[in-house]
């Protein structure tokens, strides 16, 4: 499993690094929004998490904060 953040604000370094630090994001942040590649549509709620299988298909959309426990349950289902 891989967790990636998305730079929806289009921030450039060093602003992107400052924002990641401020929100305690410790995993990689994508510079560009991947919505076209994965056909994700607009995100109205932050945070929103998309679970994408190894074939590149979105299998679940999660709205709001998630816990390690809820993510483990989703990964096992």
Image (tube, helix red, strand yellow):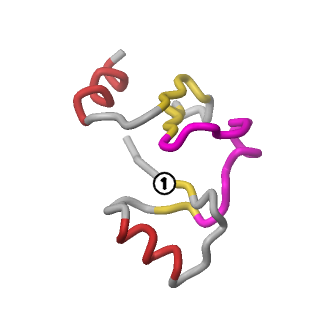
**Which residue shows up at 70% across the image and 45% down it?**
35
Which residue is the extreme one toward the left?
Answer: 69
Is 43 positioned to the left or the right of 72 in the image?
A: right
**Which residue shows up at 36% across the image and 22% down it?**
74
Percent of width and height locating residue 39: 73, 36
The N terminus: image quadrant = top left
Residue 63 included in the magenta stretch of the image: no
Q: Which residue is mark 1?
A: 5
Q: Pointer 1: residues within 10 angstroms few (<14), some, or many (20+)?
A: some
**Which residue shows up at 52% across the image and 43% down it?**
46
The C terminus: image quadrant = top left
Percent of width and height locating residue 9: 63, 63
- Residues 60 and 64: in front is 64
From what the image shows, is residue 61 above or below residue 15? above
Magenta segment: 31-47
Which residue is the extreme one toward the bottom?
Answer: 14
Residue 42 included in the magenta stretch of the image: yes
Which residue is the extreme one toward the top?
Answer: 77
The rendered magenta stretch, by its main secondary structure, is classed as loop
- Residues 77 and 65: in front is 65
Secondary structure of the residue carrying tag 1 is strand
Q: How many marks?
A: 1
Is 43 positioned to the left or the right of 68 in the image?
A: right
Percent of width and height locating residue 64: 44, 34
């Amino acid at each position: 499993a891989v967790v990636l953040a998305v730079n929806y604000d289009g921030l450039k370094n060093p602003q992107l690094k400052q924002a990641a630090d401020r929100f305690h994001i410790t995993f990689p942040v994508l510079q560009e929004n991947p919505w076209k590649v994965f056909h994700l549509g607009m995100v109205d709620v932050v945070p929103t998490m998309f679970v994408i299988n190894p074939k590149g298909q979105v299998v679940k959309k999660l709205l709001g904060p998630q816990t390690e426990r809820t993510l483990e349950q989703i990964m096992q289902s």
